[in-house]
Amino acid sequence: MSQYKLFCIPYAGGTAKYFSGLKDAFQETNVEVIPLEYAGHGRRGREVKYDNFDQLARDVYARICDNCKRGNDDKIILFGYSMGALVVYDIVTRLMDETMRNRVEHIFLAAHEPPDILFRGNDFAKFSDEEFLEEMIKLGGIDERLLNNPRFLKPYLTLIRSDYGLLASYEWNGIFEDFGVDMTIFYTEEDTPFENIFHWGKYNSKEICFYNFAGGHFFLKEKQEEIVDIIRLQII
């Protein structure tokens, strides 16, 4: 039976902990779930944050490569959530060499438009603190406990704003680079309308499946059981 490494790449302001439920769901299977952490986030909170999107993508790719040295025959699965979807696209189409690309078995993307669609969040970094907080509350990305604790809320908002600055620094080259591997896209109409998410089909010559869920931007927690079943269906 093939062995898989499922690398999970988080959203802006997110941490590896967001994927802990996914990791638990694949215990004692042939899928090793590996949630990745951005510099300046979570367990890497003391590290210097990135200056631009390119630094972020290169750091994530380096960590994927380092992990893949410990299991050279394992197949690679990539799961990018929100900002992580763009990170996956950049890694696969720009940074991966042929040997690594040949190991990629499947790609899962969630909650983000492809790079040819203007991302509405590009303006968030310019918002006032009050406007920015309001937008984050709308997205559902702020824990209610933080709202009542300004001591922790302010640094968290600073971190998210920094990540949105990284997203704003991303420049699409105008070319629909081909993933060249089977893909699955998770989205909600409330968060990302289908006419936008459907554009991911322009970036892939292989099979691509779309799954529409109810809910807002952070639907993984509520729909985890269904998403786990879909992942199993696609790769096991």
Image (cartoon, grey):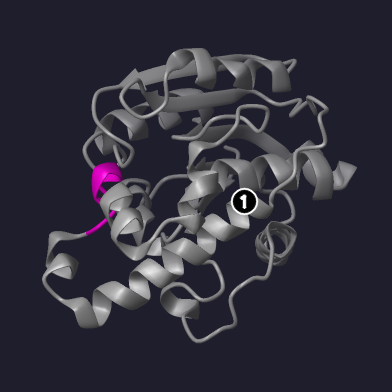
Image coordinates of residue 23 in percent, x first then y, are 37, 53
Q: Residue at x 73, y 47 (%)?
A: 91
Residue 85 image-quadrant placement: top right
Residue at 66 percent across and 48 percent down: it is: 74
Q: Quadrant of the N terminus?
A: top right
Q: Residue visible at 68% across and 70% down?
A: 51
Horizontal relation, residue 80 to residue 174: left or right: left
Let me know if residue 19 appears in the view. yes
Between 215 and 156, the residue placed more toward the observer is 156
Amino acid at dot 1: Ala
Say which element carries label 1: helix
**Position above or below: 161 against 219:** below
Q: Is residue 41 above or below residue 22?
A: below
The magenta span reads 137-142
**Numbered-mark total:** 1
Residue 78 screen position, x and y as percent = 59, 43
Spot the residue most to the front: 128
Residue reaching furthest to the bottom: 46
Magenta stretch contains residue 138: yes
Q: Residue furthest right?
A: 98
| Residue that numbered label 1 is attached to | 168
Q: Is residue 36 visible?
A: no
The x and y percentages for residue 119 are: 55, 36
